[in-house]
Image (tube, helix red, strand yellow):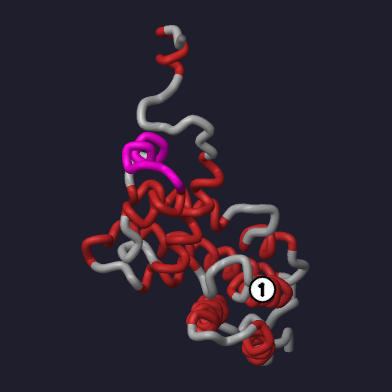
Amino acid sequence: MKTLQQTARRKPGRPLGFDREAALHQAMLLFWQHGYEATSVNDLTKAMGITPPSLYTAFGDKKQLFLDAVHRYVSGPVTSKSIIEEAPTARAAAAGLLHAATIGFTDEATPAGCLLASSAISCSPVAADVQKALSRIRIRIEKRLRDKILQDQRVGKLTPKIDADALAGHIMAVIQGMSTLARDGSNREKLSSVAAVAMLAWPTSN
């Protein structure tokens, strides 16, 4: 028979054997496939194998669950931040981002395209705060790339005539477009070709 102390240690609404990371991964895949607003709490609890009270106990609410899923999506051993910071040049950083997008958007183990892009597109004004959170993530990535470009310009690796904002924006726009192509069914080979063509527009140091 359970003692009062044993019962108190278990949080209400959370099932025995609850694996938070596994549940979060399932939620991430569902948001990735359907977007934020089109994914219901009922859809989430079915995919995660938990009850609504368990979801609220573990994650707070649907919005917080989504933000946790996004954090999981942008985290890992290889991130946009590590790609940019570890690249020897801004050109290499841009090529690295495009390559990572090509692989990530066409991985057979995950939904096609980019979670950030698909979720942002499907957000209505009701979910404006979620859309802003996604926008802030993309802006941070673009800023890191722009700073890398400016750094190359200062040391003569890249022509000072180029607009760093426009060049960083160009790469981000291509990545967003690649996400749409992937969700429309384009394969890895096509996305790789798109990335290669995009890099042809990269300026030289002359």
Residue appearing at x 70%, y 72% in the figure? 96
Residue designated by label 1: 103
Examine the residues drawn in magenta and state their main secondary structure. Answer: helix
In this orientation, which residue lies closer to the viewer: 203 or 57? 57
Q: Position of residue 161 (x, y in %)?
A: 60, 85
176 above or below 79? below
Q: Say which residue appears at 34% left-offset and 49% top-offset.
A: 62
Left or right position of 141 against 56: right
Magenta highlight on residue 65: no
> Quick check: can you spot residue 90?
no
Q: Is residue 167 above or below residue 32?
A: below
Residue drawn at x 46%, y 9% is 1
Q: Residue at x 64, y 59 (%)?
A: 79
Q: Amino acid at mark 1?
A: Ile
Q: Does any portion of residue 108 appear in the rendered image? A: yes
The picture places residue 103, in percent across and down from the top left corner, at 66, 73
Magenta span of residues: 49-59
Looking at the image, the residue that sits furthest to the left is 126
Quadrant housing residue 40: bottom left
Residue nearest the viewer, comparing 199 with 156: 199
Q: Position of residue 125 (x, y in %)?
A: 23, 66
Q: Quadrant of the C terminus?
A: bottom right
Crowding at dot 1, Cα within 10 Å, few <14 / some 14-19 / many 20+, comes out as some
